[in-house]
Amino acid sequence: MIASFLAQARWFGGKGRAFTVTGTRELGRLEPAPPGPEVVLLLVEVSYDGTADRELYQLPLALYDEPQERLEHALVGRWPTAEDGAFAYDAAHDRAAMAQLLRSFGERPGFVRLPGHDLDLDAPGSLFSGEQSNSSVLFGEDSVLKLFRKVTPGENPDITTHRVLTEAGSPYVAQLYGWIEVEDLQLGMLQQFLRTASDGWDLALASVRDLFAEADLHAEEVGGDFAGEATRLGTALADVHAQLRSSFPTAVAPAESVAALMSERLDAATLVVPELAEHADAARAVFAAMAGLGEIPVQRVHGDLHLGQTLRTVNGWKIVDFEGEPAKPLAERLLPDSPWRDVAGMTRSFDYAPHAVAESLPDVDPDVLHQRSVRAAEWARRNRRAFLSAYCDDGALGATDRVLLTAYVVDKAVYECVYEARNRPTWLPIPLAGVARLTAG
């Protein structure tokens, strides 16, 4: 029953692999508040056939004595027995079940509530659509509950990082209101709903379209010029990094070891993307320059930063989703890293946006394509410079920082090549061109 439901769940990370549900465990029950259901916080263990891989998934169940036609799309089966158990639905789809979770904050063990915000406990819940790895439920215009679907014992960096930044009064994140924690598992987080927010990636694409529509103007002359926003983003990230340095342990890492890992990723990527081979020696030279830097400072960082992880509100930019790179194990995501990894991710995002727009437009004559390519490069260069200038507080990059940043940007572009080759082959020229540009000279 559960295996069949997982196989078609959008957030299940094991699609395409043969798996077996090897265990379930009830972490808690919320008593029904008529006409609402009983809610079971269920933990599901998945084992992948022929391997030692094990993963844990959270599947909260809303239990009803009778079938609920409005929830038919979220039916899991019958629980706890297939013959005479209650009708069990994925609780994230059920407003009544989510209302019970919301009312539990500060009232039940495991539902931790931070002081400072008067929660609207009667706000109706509605599930966000489009999410891939988690499930988020919006409660009116007050708060958002993010339920982590794949869970790992120990701290979740999305919670711990948001807590530190919230308690420090950072204006650059959505405020954390609370979280759900059972035993050593953090199951979800409740945070501020940013009611005026616009997605940073969408805003960047709109700016590029404005530029492409004005054939005779440069990026700084177009009404949708993004450089001011890029500047404010640089200031926001610098402030967040400074706060994380003061709130979490810092350390140093051998540059040689970090560079060796980058070279290993390059070797693996070249097997997937043979086109990388012609740039491989130049990329290794970039990593070798980094290896000679001795020790480099590391700290808590975002870990997966790009324009899609930012929101623009009337009160400025907010940085979201501090879980780190989803493909990495939790223990690795919790390790201190260089802040230049976040900077590199954002600069690559500035490079991606104009080329993504260009790729989406219909093919035209070669002269127009060339002009579009030149304008895309101009937009990216202008916004990279604005962002970096603000991040460095209007100071120029020093020689050491430039070597570090270049290595992290090349590493990110190599990762993008593998991603595009596997998921969007027609976009592969975007990161390949980035690797070529970054390793030239």
Image (tube, grey):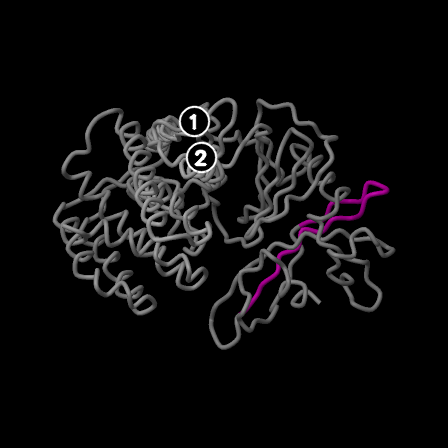
| SS assignment at label 2 | helix
Query: Residue 47 location, x and y as percent?
Result: 54, 69
Query: Which segment is the magenta one?
Result: 28-47
Characterize the local packing of mark 1: few (<14), some (14-19) or many (20 or more) Cα atoms within 10 angstroms.
few
Q: Is residue 53 magenta?
A: no
Which residue is at 32% across, 51% downward? 412
- Looking at numbered disc 2 in the image, what kind of residue is underneath it? Asp
Which residue is at 23% across, 65% downward? 277
Q: In this rendering, is residue 97 above or below 317?
A: below
> Label 2 belongs to which residue?
210
Q: Are marks 2 and 1 in contact (CB under 8 Å)?
A: yes
Q: Earlier in the sequence, mark 2 or mark 1?
A: 2
Where, quadrant-wise, is the N terminus in this rendering? bottom right
Which residue is at 21% across, 26% downward? 395
146 left or right of 274?
right
Query: Residue 322 location, x and y as percent?
Result: 45, 41
> Label 1 belongs to which residue?
223
Dominant secondary structure (helix, strand or loop) of the stretch shown in magenta: strand
Q: 217 or 250, which lies in front?
A: 217
Q: 89 or 29, which lies in front?
A: 89
Marks 2/1: CA–CA distance: 7 Å
Residue 414: image tag? none
Instruction: Determine which quarter of the picture holds residue 346.
Output: top left
Query: Residue 338 location, x and y as percent?
Result: 28, 42
Instruction: Determine which quarter of the picture holds residue 11.
Output: bottom right
Which residue is at 63% across, 38% downward? 111
224 left or right of 179?
left
36 left or right of 382?
right
Total marks placed: 2
Characterize the local packing of mark 2: few (<14), some (14-19) or many (20 or more) Cα atoms within 10 angstroms.
some
- Looking at numbered disc 1 in the image, what kind of residue is underneath it? Gly
Query: Residue 258 location, x and y as percent?
Result: 23, 52
